[in-house]
Image (tube, helix red, strand yellow):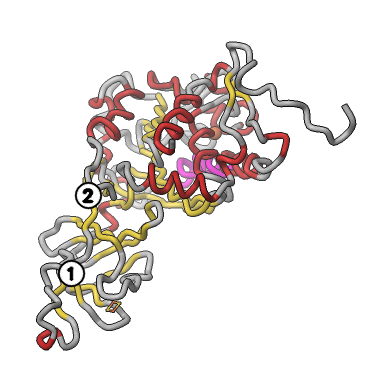
Amino acid sequence: MTTGEIAPSSQGEDLPESLKGTLPGRYYTDPAIFRAEQAAIFETQWFCAVLAADLDKPGRFETVQVGRESVLVARGRDGAVNAYLNVCRHRGARLCTEESGEVRRAFQCPYHAWTYSLDGKLVSAPNLTSMPDVDRARFGLHRVHVREWLGYVWVCLADEPPSFEETVIGDVTTRLGTPDAIVGYQVADLKLGRRIEYDVKANWKQIVENFMECYHCATIHPELTEVLPEFADGLAAQYFVGHGAEFGRDVEGFTVDGSAGLERIPGVNEEQDRRYYAITVRPTVFINLVPDHVIFHRMFPLTADRTLVRCDWLYLPEVVDSGADIDRSVELFHRVNQQDFDACERCQLAMDSRSYRDGGVLVPSEHHIGEFHDWVRAHTG
Ligand code: FES
Ligand code: FE
């Protein structure tokens, strides 16, 4: 073979049984594939949008990108959270351009001042009385399905949403063995201690795949493998730690230097104590459970090669309110995040290469990532 020639692909068909192929590189770069994923995954599945406590009073709102749509999530006067497509029904102006904010009573479109109540009804418009055909009941904001779980607002843009129990809670159950295993962490009652946003120059699937395996842990996560020695052998897969990865013998807490953590969440049982659990909730959520806090990642895929990740560190309210020092506990997973996202960006750079045209390989401890690829393919056709 002369220099520069590309060897015929040996991926897929003729791989030995212990190896599996990955998705081809174009799945991470092709805008058409990304659009298909937006339509067939993010706009059809339950999507974790907002921390409910961030909407702490009526009129508080956030706008989030869900697939191709901007979604306006707002707390109503009755205390319930509602979600709407963020589009004025008159001529289609973006109703709210801010990422978050507060309105007193209603959302007013900045273009011709059509005004919508917090529960999405069209309540007024200039000259409305002289336009009897503008039926207020008909031109309310388009509603989006909403569920609250674990203290987060999940939205679904599908007309007929899939079962929340089967698709969202089902992922947690698969990983932890029982949906009850997460109950003791009282996630919905915890309070935000710190939030860090990561603007990752990588396709969202890179981030999911990375989170699903721990083959990389020994190489890129020195602090994490100190705390969780079973991650150091390069074989452990986070996916398989539904039983929980045990803290090292001399480790006192899930902190950057293994020093003591904060007050333990009372519902955490003996078996869960001194253990770390990691859960992937398809398509865009990762949850880590440790005895004194919960780390909750929400992803917002923006383009084929850019994903925003919002990571919340949640603690007992009394821990946050006391002003306790959470820096060492935040620092551990902040470093893990930076290490992981650097790796994702490093892979993203090569997705357009001829070398990766037919994809790469999954070694045995990564085989379950193939199930994720099958899931993506099943949705996008
Ligand atoms: Fe919103 Fe006209 S586009 S009021
Ligand atoms: Fe990692």
Whole-percent x, y for residue 136 in the image? 12, 73
Q: Residue furthest top?
A: 17
Residue 337 within the magenta-colored segment of the rendering: yes
Quick one: 167 or 53, which is closer to the camera? 167
**Screen quadrant of the C terminus:** top left
Is residue 273 among the parts visible in the rendering?
A: yes
Q: Earlier in the sequence, mark 2 or mark 1?
A: 1
Whole-percent x, y for residue 67 in the image? 40, 51
**Screen quadrant of the N terminus:** top right
Label 2 to label 1, Cα distance in Å?
Answer: 20 Å
Using the image, determine if residue 44 lies above or below residue 78: above
Residue extent of the magenta highlight: 326-338
Q: Quadrant of residue 313?
A: top left
* Residue tagged 2: 146
The mark closer to the camera, 2 or 1, is 1
Q: Residue at x 33, y 23 (%)?
A: 174
* Residue tagged 1: 139
Label 1 environment density (alpha carbons within 10 Å; few <14, some 14–19, many ≥20): some
Is residue 325 among the parts visible in the rendering?
A: no
Q: Quadrant of residue 105?
A: bottom left
Q: Residue at x 62, y 38 (%)?
A: 25
Q: Please, what is the three-letter code of the amino acid marked with disc 2?
A: Val
Q: Please, what is the three-letter code of the amino acid marked with disc 1?
A: Phe
